[in-house]
Amino acid sequence: MLFSRRLILGLAMAGTLAGALAFPALAGEGPTEIDLFFPVPVDGKLARDMGTMIKEFNETHPDVKATAVYTGSYDDTLIKTRAAIKAGKPPSAVIMSANFLLDMQIENELTNLDALIKADGTTKEQFLGQFFPALQGNAVINRSVYGVPFHNSTPLLYVNADKAKEAGLDPDKPPQTWAELTDWAKKLTRREGDKVTQWGLAIPCAYDYCGWMMETLTMSNGGRYYNEEFGGEVYYDTPSMLGALSWWNDLIAKHKVHPPGATPGPAVSTSFISGNAAMIMLSTGSLTYVRDNAKFAYKVAFIPRNVRNAVPIGGASLIIPAGLEADRQKAAWTLIKWMTSPEKSGWWSRATGYFAPNMAAYKTPDMVEFLNKNPDAKTAVEQLDVAKPWFATYKTVPVRKNLEDEVMLVLNGKKQPKEALAAAQKAADETLKPYNAETSLKLP
Amino acid sequence: MSLAEPAALPVATSAAPRLDVMKRFTTRFKASLPAYLLLLPSLIFLALFTYGAMGRVFVDALYQRTTPKAPVRFVGLDNISAVLADPAFTGAVVNNLIYAVGTAVPSIALALLFALALSRTNVVSSALRAALFLPVLIPMVAASALFMFVFLPNVGLLDYYIGRLLPVLPNWLGDGDIALYAIMVITVWKNAGYYMLFFLAGLQAVPEDVMEAAHLDGAGPYMRLRHIILPELKPTFLFVTVIAILNAVTQVDHVFVMTQGGPSNSTNLVLFYIYQQAVEHYDVGKASAATLLTLAALMSLTALSFRTMANREGGP
């Protein structure tokens, strides 16, 4: 026979392989097995810290066996979570970028956590009360809790103190208003003829970062960026955003103190470290990187205001995807509560540079000692008093990109702020149309 | 040719009378059964992971949901016309055309130049070949991460050297007019060494006696290149061109890592547009429609080029 031993062996192997693919380890008696999807938005060491954290959880919780699954960036984590939900195998918990929650809730992909909170015998108010008020906006949708803040950030102004002193400025009194900041940037810009050898100020603009910085500038100019109560509206074509974008454009085109074009976050932090930019606006998430690499004295300060002090938050929340069995849901809830407790929250904050969302974390002895040693980490926490939620709409990413593409044209000198914002508004309204058709424009 | 034959060969020997089609079919099937069984494992996986996925794209391209909570419904060709009407898609197609021509031509020209210069094997040329081939071994993602630092405005390697010569330093990846060309430089850098291999192989096929005869007839280096080497390399050219164009459509790792299609969509290529539709817009219908359009374009291109190749080979 032609198909004798070898063929049968081959078929058997293929069969086993297919079987192994189709029926992964059938769950028997024992601890509830759960998966946690986690992104690493800053640097590789986080993956090891997460391993340490989950190991400790498993040792102290014999009835649950959690596995941490690394899923790439924030955006990748959203993709992988959605793919897993579509395949009918949702992960039990996910560390999800805080502004993706609304979009996921609209798509029915999130578990409402109210029942789990109630089952613990606490009220929603008590539960949320543990966290900084600024973080609650991105965790609560339609008065129901959908996420638990895990690690968060705000934008900061980083100042090269040595360069400031050289220019006759006092780094202990960093600029507080846009006027002062513009003045500082002018004094900190060095030129050789037409060529700039040192920029006064650099603000990052790449997809994701650009929208966040626009929200930062718009908020400090009195604006809102989006409707916090309803996912179908953004306020792009408004005086507050026009002022913000015009000022950014002036820094480049009129004052010539900001590098032209769209510069991504890593390029901005590198140019600060190398002394090429004397001041930058960046996330608190970069603080550890700057602290470890800057060979000069630096200061961090609040984002200066034009109308008011206000900044958006950034970072991620823990969520439970929809469609999970009850026992896994319960196990995931245990894990989430443990990870966001004051001790763990503080530990994670010290390891990563993000601030701890749980207010009680700052009363733990370890944290008090850490802040005494690193007073710059305190600025981010203090700025939380004026922080507001991160923009979240139906289809957050495309709606944000509608604005970012136009902002990039302005920074490259291809469009004027006014017409760019009008175009962005038009594009965003188009993206939001299906959602409005189902909500605000669905009339009886 | 001969590779495809064996499965059918037994039929010829054990062929039944022509009239009995049914019987002939069963005999043929019986004879080739072992072959099919041997192919079965691969066929299962091909069906599951290649053709199954392609079939799914066909189906998905025909469905769409109008509002977030509405169920998906059959919309026919609406997705395709929506994609064609999307300025981001047409922009991506234009970018991709510029990108394809702008990467294929220089990388093929460089590859030919390298191959001609290094066609004789000795220690130096072997070392140089290895050096030129090195970029091929570096994964695109790693290369992109590397080049991000080369292109860093003001402090990057490029600005560090060129900065002395230019009055204003360009923002290589942040300026919409330059970003696409910056991306193209990486592709050329990465692919020229790979295509060089094909030309080196092609040069081995140039008949030695013809070259000698030309030499004796007093043909100079240019004449030999123009009238002997280049015509002999025609099939290689055709093959490399097809590969280069396919690469221009299917390799977008560097766009993903370095620019995400920006600034303002100036480096958005077709495959990245599909990714954006599927992932950012969460619009499977439109992503599938764009995939179908791309597949159709690529397949007709490949068919055309292979037919040309077949014609060439059949000719004198």
Image (cartoon, grey):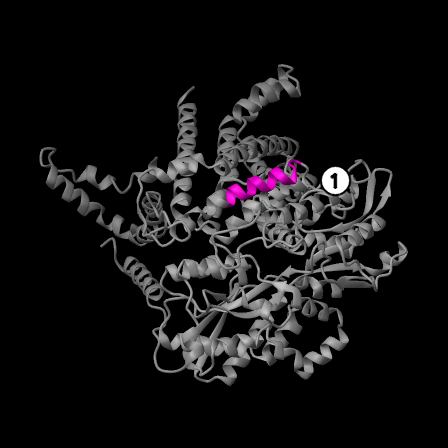
Res A384 → quadrant: bottom right
| Residue in the image at 54% along x and 26% along y | B207
Chain letter of mark 1 equals A
The vertical placement of A333 against A295, above or below, is below
Residue beneath the point at 18% across and 47% down: B30
Residue A217, horizontal then vertical, whole percent:
67, 53
Does A238 appear in magenta?
no
Q: Quadrant location of the N terminus of chain A?
A: bottom left
Residue extending farthest to the top is B217
Query: The residue under label 1 is which amino acid type?
Result: Ala
Is A220 positioned to the left or the right of B247 in the image? right
Residue beneath label 1, please?
A253
Q: Is residue A240 above or below residue A377?
A: above
Q: Which residues are magenta?
A: A414-428
Look at 55% across and 47% down and name the residue there: A401
**Is residue B265 in view from this perspective?**
no
Quarter assignment of residue A220: bottom right
The 10 Å Cα crowd at callout 1, few under 14, some 14 to 19, many 20 or more, is some
Q: Residue B81's x, y, as percent?
A: 39, 35
On whether residue A422 falls in the magenta region, the answer is yes
